[in-house]
Image (spheres, helix red, strand yellow):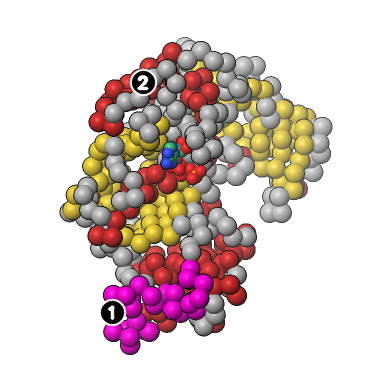
Amino acid sequence: MTGIRLDSVSKVYDSRHLAVDKVSLEVAAGEFMVLLGPSGCGKTTLLRMIAGLEELTDGELWLGRTRASGLAPKDRGIALVFQSGALYPNRTARDNIKFPLQIAKQDPVEVNEKVSGLARILKIGAALDRFPRTLSGGERQRVAIGRAIVREPQIFLMDEPLSNLDATMRTELRQEIGAMARDLNVTTVYVTHDQVEALTLADRIAIMRDGRIEDVGTPAQVYSDPATAFVAGFLGTPRINLMSATVRVTARHRVSLDLGGQSIALPTIDRRSIILSKHDGIRVIVGGRSDAFTVSADGGVDGLAGRLRALEFHGDRWIAYVESGIEMVNPDLVGVDAAARRRSQRTTHDGRHTKHAVPDSEPAAPVSALRRLTKAFRQSKDAAAAPPAEPTHRRADLVLEVDPAAGLTAGAKVTFAVDTARLHIFDEEGHRVDRVTH
Ligand code: ATP
């Protein structure tokens, strides 16, 4: 088994689009790593660099103990599966899967055993003797995965393999991919923008934004202890509530979060109080997921107050939209300045969004001048003065989970208790400021 190491890897397209920006990441041998992030954040580019389909502009890539630069894609021990794996139309599913082994002149008995084993894991036994045109999208993708993995690659790379399938097939095949990766114990890097796929499949998730990794950890770590407000906002449904607040410290060293007209006091035993007391008078962002609040009819609890604007039934729970007058922060825009937002509107020659287009006046830089380009890019961010398309802060509803037994109706006044232990506090740039180091 082979692990992967990326050391400060960057990719600049056409000498001007910084798609991947000094990414360092280690994927352990046998690990299932998911690259998660919004469209255009650089996931596919990173994957293609690992596969050898894109050259690195800067940095180093190691596959096991081998430095990958100069290694042709076919010599990297890598198998790739894309959104829709192309199959040979005139070969049956079985022959499609067998093909790479036949080319390698492997023993036919062993080949048959391998195909049967994979067919069992991928649940395509009944489809093996059919031609691709008679298979469903999900079956075709299973065959494509089988064909990629049958060569027993050292590393398995998948780029949104489920995105063309309907919801039921996605769930089924997701489970099969998870089972296959566990059974075969192959080092896997899986690209998706779907948080459910990431949370359910990954050993660890690397969350990307604008060409950088913002957070890496197990699904439980990145969900429960996100490094940035963007990560907190990207994971979880409904989205986390991000409230704009100011830290206040009382004469008795009690820390409270002033939400403008309402406030949340941290218990004195909360170990984060010591750290936060250093931020007296500083604006912060307070993150709380919907289940960190307990709503009840007015007067029921001592907490924040608001008016229940709407209630939504989500099958397993009710979600309440509460007008509270608290200024809310858009997680997508935290830490993104006006220039980056303006650039995000631009499109590349092929019509895809680019988050990193350097202004037109910037002279094209040679590939080796990455540092100069990066500096220019950062300076262009600082110099930008374009008004934001959408405000970062705005009055918006708090989104909370409610107990149907509480008998609440739209329009009612409500109060809601806050589980302060489950709040995350970020600075205005979106970085955590409340982490207690042990
Ligand atoms: P998606 O989920 O939409 O595929 P992604 O996170 O995989 O997005 P990439 O495809 O890696 O993102 O693209 C990262 C950035 O690089 C984007 O701004 C994209 O427009 C740009 N880009 C990608 N390929 C090229 C290319 N061949 N030439 C120029 N720019 C490119």
Q: Position of residue 75 (x, y in %)?
A: 24, 60
Does the rendering let one see residue 123? no
What's the residue type where badge 1 is placed? Lys
**Of discs 1 and 2, which sits in the foreground?**
2
Magenta stretch: give its range.
87-113
User: Which residue sits furthest bottom?
Assistant: 109
> Ligand 1 is located in which of the four quadrants?
top left
Q: Mark 1 points at which residue?
A: 105
- Magenta highlight on residue 92: yes
Q: Is mark 1 within 8 Å of ligand 1?
A: no
User: 418 or 397, which lies in front?
Assistant: 397
Does the rendering let one see residue 15? yes
Q: Where is residue 74 in the image (x, y as percent from the top left)?
A: 28, 60
Q: Position of residue 185 (x, y in %)?
A: 33, 66
Residue density around tag 2, few if under 14, some if 14–19, many if 20 or more, within 10 Å? few
Q: Position of residue 81 (x, y in %)?
A: 43, 60
Q: Residue at x 32, y 75 (%)?
A: 103
User: 13 or 181, which lies in front?
Assistant: 13
Measured Cα–Cα span from mark 1 to mark 2: 52 Å
Query: What number is the disc on residue 369?
Result: none
Q: Which residue is drawn at 35% across and 31% down?
A: 15
Q: Mark 2 points at which residue?
A: 363
Task: Name the element at disc 1.
Answer: loop
Say which label, 1 or 2, has the lower sequence index.
1
**Vertical comparison of 24 with 151: above or below:** above
Image quadrant where one finds the N terminus: bottom left
Task: Name the element at disc 2.
Answer: loop
Image quarter for residue 28?
A: bottom left
Q: Is the magenta stretch mostly helix, strand or loop?
A: helix
Image quadrant where one finds the C terminus: top left
Left or right: where does residue 91 sit relative to residue 323?
left
Q: Residue at x 53, y 69 (%)?
A: 140
